[in-house]
Amino acid sequence: MEHYLILARSVTYAQRMQKALDRAGIRCQISRAPRDLTDLGCAYIVRVAVSDLTSALIALHGERLDPVQIFLYQRGVYREVGP
């Protein structure tokens, strides 16, 4: 199943992202970032559906919660698609 991972620099930042997305009506999940994605020890990701990425980024930007990186998970592989 395809989805996007929005990288946050900490669990607190990811929780703020989750709350902003909840307010915008966008479903998401937070978890620790996979080790092979980043060398930041305390990084977390916010997972969103492919169809929700544009709306999620608009909602996050509106609350000054811009992501560190964005990855697409597709066919078992992570691919960086933007900051």
Image (spheres, grey):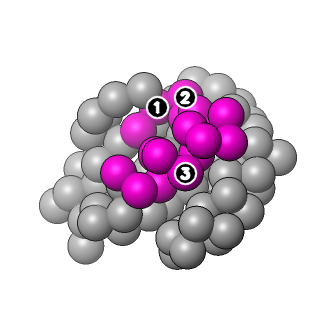
Q: Residue at x 67, y 34 (%)?
A: 64
**What residue sits right under mark 2 in the picture?**
68
| Relative depth, front residue between 17 and 12 | 17
| SS for callout 2 | loop
Residue type at the position of mark 2: Val
Choose mark 3 or mark 2, whichever is in front. 3
Q: Which numbered tag is attached to residue 13?
A: none
User: Residue at the front extreme?
Assistant: 62
The answer to whether residue 33 of the structure is visible from this angle is no
Q: How many C-alpha atoms fall within 10 Å of the one at disc 2: few (<14), some, or many (≥20)?
A: few
Counting from the top left corner in percent of width and height, residue 36 is at 45, 37
Residue type at the position of mark 3: Ala
Q: How many C-alpha atoms fall within 10 Å of the one at disc 1: few (<14), some, or many (≥20)?
A: some
Counting from the top left corner in percent of width and height, residue 55 is at 41, 56
Q: Residue at x 29, y 62 (%)?
A: 50
Q: Give the answer, above or below, for where 40 lies relative to 18.
A: above
For the record, the magenta segment spans: 54-70
Counting from the top left corner in percent of width and height, residue 68 is at 55, 29
Residue type at the position of mark 1: Gln
Q: Which numbered tag is attached to residue 69?
A: 1
Residue 44 appears left or right of 72: right
Residue 60, quarter of the rendered image: top right
| SS for callout 1 | strand
